[in-house]
Amino acid sequence: MEASLVNTLALQISKSLAKSPSILKEGLGCLIILLQNQKGDSLEKKPYTHLSPIPGLISTLQAIAAAHDISPLLRYLLPHLIHSVITDSDESQTEESSDKMNFSSLLESALQNILLENGLDHMVAKVLLQEYISYGVLSDMSPDSLTGLNQRLLPFVRLLETKYPSALDSVLEGHLKNITDQKEQDLFHQFISLSMSSGKYKILTDSDTSLLLSLNHPLSAVRNLAVEHLKEIIKTAQEGFDESFLREAVLSRLKDDIPEVVLAALTALEAYADHLGPETTVSSLLSLFQRVDLSKNGKWFPVLKEAIGILDDGRLLKDNENLESQVVMELLSFLVITTPYPEYAEHQFTLFITKSKLYSKHPLTKGWSKVLERVVTKSHPSDVVGKANQALIATMTKNLSLMEPSLKLHIIEDLIQVAGKQLSSIREKMAFLVILYTLVQSIEQLSEPHHLQTALNVYSLLEARIRKLITKGISMEVSLNENPKSQIDNLSLGDILSDYLDNLRMAESGGNENWILLTLLLESFIPAIQSPDTPFRGQTWWNPEQLDGQACSYLRLLIRLFDIVIAGASQSHMAFRFKALMQLLFKVHLSDPSDLFKFLSLLWSYNYNLADQLNYTLKALLQTQALYVGSTLVGAQTVSTVKQLVSSSSPVVPSLIVNLGNPIREVRRAAIACLQTLGGAEASPFFPIIEKLLQSTEEIIADPAHVSQAFCSLFEESPMSDKPRSYRQKLATALKEVLRCGCDPKCPSYIASGLMRALQEVNSELVLSTLLPALERLLAKANQEPVVLLKDEVLLLQLIVRKYNEHSASLLAKNQQSLELFIAALKATNEVYQGLPTFQIIALEQITKGFFASLSDEKIQQRLLGVIFDLLVECKNPVCAQTINSVFKAIAVDAEQVAKELAPLEKPKSPATVQQARRQKMQLRKSQAAEPTAEAGCVNWQRVALILELLQHKKKLKNPQALVPSLFNLLNRCLEPLNQELVNFEYTKQLILSCLLNICQKLSPDGGRISPDILDEEKFNVELIVQCVRGSDMPQTHHHALLLLGAAAGMFPDKVLHNIMPIFTFMGANIMRLDDTYSFQVINKTVQTVIPALIQADDGKSSQTGNVANVVTKIINVFVDALPHVPEHRRLPILGQLVRTVGPERFLWVLLLLLFKQHVTKTASTATNGDKEAVLERDAEFWISVCCEFEVEEQLASLINILQYLPTLPEDKQEGKGRNKTTRKKTKEEETAELLFSVETHTGKELRHFKFLSVSFMAQLLASNSLIGKVADCDEVAQKSLQNLEQSLLEEVLRYINTVAHSVEENADKPTAKFWRVLLNKSYDVLDKVNALLPTETFIPVIRGLMSNPLPSVRRKAMDLLNNKLQQRLQWEEGQVELLLELIEELLSIVRRKRKKGEDDDDEQAINRQTALYSLKLLCRSFGAGHQQSFVPVLSAAVDLITDEEEERNVMGSALLCIAEVTSTIKALAIPQLPRLMPAVLKTLKDRKELLSNEIFLLSAVTALQRVSETLPHFISPYLMDILLLVAHLGRITVSAGQSPQLSVRLTSLQTTLATKLAPRVLLPTVTKCYSKLVDTHQSRLGPLMDILKEHIGHMESEQLNSHQSELTAFFLKALDFRSEHSEDDLEKTNEIEGHVINCLLVMVLKLSEVTFRPLFFKLFDWCKTEDASKDRLLTFYRLSDCIADKLKGLFILFAGHLVKPISDLLSQTNLIKTDEALFDSENNTEKSCLLLQYILDCLHKIFLYDTQRFVSKERAEALMMPLVDQLENMLGGEEKFQTRVTEHLIPSIAQFSVAIGDDSQWKPLNYQILLKTRHSSPEVRFAALVMLLELAGKLRENYMVLLPETIPFLAELMEDECEEVEHQCQRVTQQLEVILGEPLQSYF
């Protein structure tokens, strides 16, 4: 936004907040949002001055800042606030003390309570400093004033320094670099003095800069001086320095790269150590030792010496053993001699540090200084390094051996920690080797439990370095490769260390010596390891799962040693060293072959261990290497040793078998290689297995899964039958040994599970029986709390449980233990490890179809089934329930077994007395309250419900009918009153019903009858199902029961039929009211299953054949009665399904009649009068929708049945008759008829309504789009089949029409006569709709026959049907057209019949003749164009009718319409009839007195005249004048009488026809004659005549207009003289007629060119100025000129020049001020003069308005100005006329005149003349002048400013006018002028 806008908005908001502090929060939020995206720099100080005094400003900002960012507002406020605080002293003379305090407290509150973010802290500090300096520079302050300012700013600076120290420091540092002026520098120092840390900014005299900059100066000398100054500050404790600055300064200078600076910093550190603390001081000193390398720069020696002196001082490390130990260990590397030259700084420092108190008194290095001194003194310089470091190792080893165990362990841990650090310098690498040798030599001295753990930690250091060397793969030198072993043996440790150091100094890696040193270390390390005292070596398996921690640590260490040794032996150039180390390892720790192969077995199989007790990840490479080592070692063993290795007490073979299934190919290959070395041990119990495996070597290597297949093929029973008995025994023994190994508790569970995986395809009773002990043991552990099973044991247990399969299932019947263990597994629900399935799930999954079928004993099956059901009752795990469900689905169960599980316990005896019954009831309730699972009525309903749920989806069920008695028994128990009171059995009942339905579907898949041998009908208790439906309130129960009944209806139809009506009655009352898909499906299912069974019974297979029709009718009635309660969207599908099921051809009509009866008796009777039609329409739409669900044939058949049924009903109910007749038994047909509509139980009105509704609906259905669409979609074959039905329907309709017509005659004199007439009409309507469906070839002959019917009503109906057909159809075949044209004679015969007075009623009625004429008209419209000759007799007959004066008007009107149609169709063939036709038509329009009373007749006559004129325009010339006069007459009548719009349209069309169809040579003379005839007698008719002429001229071509222009000009001059010739007539009437003439002339003018129009206009101008002519011509001319100017707009300017002078004269002649003479010589002179003025002013206004050619020149302006302005005082016509003329005509004209002038020189006199009128004596004139003045200013806008000075005096006079209205108007004018001109006018007054 613009800066000014932002400033204005902020200022307004600030003012509002100052006035209304209650909206402070909202206002500040508004300011924050405003400044978020705008530049706050554009804001002035004014908003701040309004905001700062508001109370609660800071607290409100603090509240807003808690949730929003207020930095935009603070960025504006705080600088102004700081400025106010600093400049407060100058304003103290004018402000009160409270105001002065306000700014300071406001700023202090803001800094304390609001967090400054987003750079605000830096901004505040910068503004504070800049304002302080600028204020001090600009205002020459005295010392006292400066002191006062400093005191005022001191709290703010200290507050900033406390909360935002970094911001203040950065601002001060940045400003310090930019100070140049001395005065600014002094002020800056004054500002710094306010800070608590002002000292660091003070200028040092030595460096001419501040202390802070000096400490960071690029010159080391300056930094040194600054450190010295800093030291003095610390020692003297000077003020002005904060602790953080001093701390940072000392520590940062310790990191300096110049030794002298660091040395000075050390002295400062020593002085400041008490403030830093021991830890920080020691840490900074140690970091100094770490970054300094004396070998590269000896100048650091004094620095390090000083640092050691500080550390050696007892003050730092006193009473802090940990810190002292840290220092000793960190600097231990400096004890290592790295150079033999005493003059080197590093050598000197080593000698110095050994003599320090730190090391001379430390237990680890005690005595080292003397030893070192002795070695240096006695040894040759070249040997000093080696001997000194070797002596250091010996000294530290000796000192460690003399220590207390706890101290020794602590120091060893510290040494390990030091050795584990990253090595970078030569000194650290040497120190690492020295420390490592010391550690290795000291391990052996440690005792348990620390020995092995420490050994592992030391080995980790050693292993990392060796593995790094192995990875690098450095080549040995040739000299070493020649005789490496001898060279190593001849070298001492000191020599090797010395050589290693020399290589490092030459920037080499020292790889060879490093190899030697590390392998020597490893050689020393292996014997130093002590085996734990645990007895694991004597066990068959070295099982980590059962070993203690010491043994596990020992084995982990052995594995890691084996790993590094085997890696070095196979990958490095020092292989000979590592092979020797391997031998050493085996010799020291695995000297016994048994232990060696137990260790190898552990290596082979440990990577399968999921628990990882050894905490070691054994890689596949090591596993493979161990296998190859094993195969090599086996080949080197003696025969007895090999025999022992392959025995059952050795882990070798099982371990190798497990590896055969390893997913890595090389592991399998290595295992096979190892097995091959054992292949010759035939005495081994595993020999058959080894032999078989070796035969499958290639397959096993290729596929890890093949080992299980090999075992399967080895132990298959069928091939074994061909083998010798001894071989089979060996195989059995081998299998038992493998299984025994897997069952052995000592065997690792991961080995056992691997063996089980290898044997997973070996299944038999032997396998399962052998594994039962292991299963029992593992299940016992699984059931312990807490569970102690390992993950591998869990997997093993799962594998054992999976041995329960179809191959071993027979063992359950032989071995009770196997059954009990399996059941125990089924009940093991504990989830031992997340992600692993429970044993229960595994056991359940073993119950497969084959396993269950293999259980030979049915009792075992029954028990397992019972256990499964019990588990389902007890389980809380959804996975278990789902698994049980899957198991039960899969197994094949006999229904009798399930029935036994469902059978209740023996029912208790029935109580003998009521008291006993009550007691039993109470006991049952108590037992249920105590036990939720207690059985109600001796039935465990929960268990039953779960079993039934399983049966819902059970497909494989043997003998399902065996369950039926049990299920009905349970259903009966559910329905017992005692049980229903205790438990809600609805769900149980639903399950039972569903199970019964499933059984029925299985017994009868097609839904038909079943044999009694399968299921006896007596066992199927339908009554119980019905009772279940009627006694339940649950819709779901109803649904299940109805579905079951539907299924039972097909199986036992007779039994269901006895109980069917209660069911459907219940459905209608309950289920059909539910709005859900399931209920809808239940209804459909019931209907589809029950009713077809009843239909089947009707075929003769049931004894209930006669009742079926009545039963079906009753069922339909039930559905119809329930229909109002059924959800609307369900009604149509339900009824459709019902009728489709019972057969639409038989029962659709029954449904329709029942629906009609329901509407008549219930729906219509309950609806209000206003809703009855809407209800009927809604029901009818629904009934049509029902019908359209079926085929056309079925709908038509239903209509035929209804038409056959309706005549059987009596005409009316005979009240009081027939009641005394003897009662007789009714037939089935009568009973059915009474079900449809019982006359006895309904009133006569309902009977009539029923009949009428039936007939009305048939008409609606036949006219419905759906039925018509279906008929149209039928193909030719279907159409032919429909013809018979359509013919039958037509016959039935006609028969019923005759019946109703007979009833009409019989009841003509009764009150019901009207009903029968209406019913007859409806019947005709049905006939009409039937005919609409009929093929045309059938329809036409039928109609022709009906038109010969003796009854007039029938003949009329036939013609109506014909008319409808003609109107509906557009395309006809030629044959059909011929048939239709033959009807013309029949229709003409009806038209010619005329009933004469006194004749019988049989003669034709007028309405029939009209209908016949209408039919002829439609036939002519449809076919007349192609068959014109056929309709000539029709025209002749119609003309005969209209020439008969005695003919009825309605018939004559129809004849006229027929004439119109026929004439327009046959065209020229109608010419012979014109001499008779035209006079007759004109005569009817002239002579009829009742012309206006019969509008239809009048419309018909006009239509006929229009169509004849349009068709034969060239042949009506003889009648044209009569036609024009008639049209003019009718047009006037229509306007005056307000006739219908249709008649007006017809007349307009006739006028258009006359105007456009006739030639000018014919029409113009006739119009002139008509004008002459009408001008004196019937002037009101001239308007329509002029309208015809106007339209005619509009359609004339230019050539025609030019040729007839003179004729038209003469006519118009004559017509324009109408006013002058009738000057005394009514002006309004004259104006109207003249307006028609002018409008007509305007049409011609617009079609003329400029050349042709100019003479016409001047001719008219001369015409009006003729001396002898009437002055009234002036009125006509200027009115015409006004109209022409309006049409031509700017073009009229070309002709208007001659009008200026006459107009000027006329303005003066009509002004009463100028003349008293009358312009017009008549009584109404005043009215005419006013009218003339109006026309002139309007004409002038249009000329001025459209002037674009500078028409108003100076001369014309002068000619018109005064006459126009003088009209302001012309009171002609009175005050009212004056006001109207001035307002609507004069003022617009003068205003537009001013615009047209366009010259300010002319505006002045115009304005002045208007102003002069304001001084007129008449207040009306003054008022008008004011209005004119305002309008003039409005037109001129800013140009009026030049006229304003002369206007003001006149306005000032009018301000005090004596007339109040003028005064008020003057005020309004002044206000409007201010608005128009844009500036106030008060200054002008």
Image (cartoon, rainbow, N blue to C red):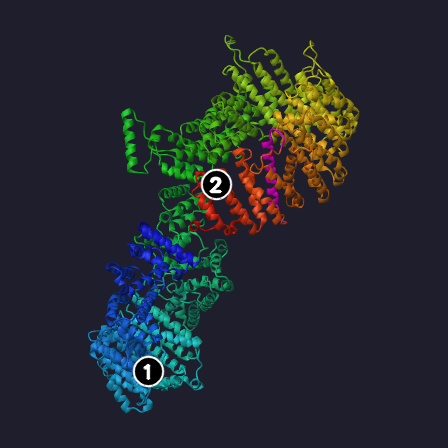
Which residue is the site of mark 1?
A: 220
- The quarter of the picture where residue 154 lies is bottom left
Q: Which amino acid does label 1 sit on?
A: Ser
Q: Is residue 996 left or right of residue 334?
A: right
- The quarter of the picture where residue 183 lies is bottom left
The answer to if 1747 sits in the magenta stretch is yes
Residue 1716 appears at what percent x and percent y?
58, 34
Above or below, 100 relative to 845: below
Q: What residue type is labelled 2?
A: Lys
The answer to if 433 sits in the magenta stretch is no
Residue 1645 appears at what percent x and percent y?
69, 40
Between 1481 and 268, the one lying in front of the other is: 1481
Classify mark 1: helix, strand or loop: helix
| Residue numbers of the magenta segment | 1720-1748
Q: In this view, does 612 lie to the left or right of 1515?
A: left
Residue 1370 appears at what percent x and percent y?
69, 31
Q: Main secondary structure of the magenta part?
A: helix
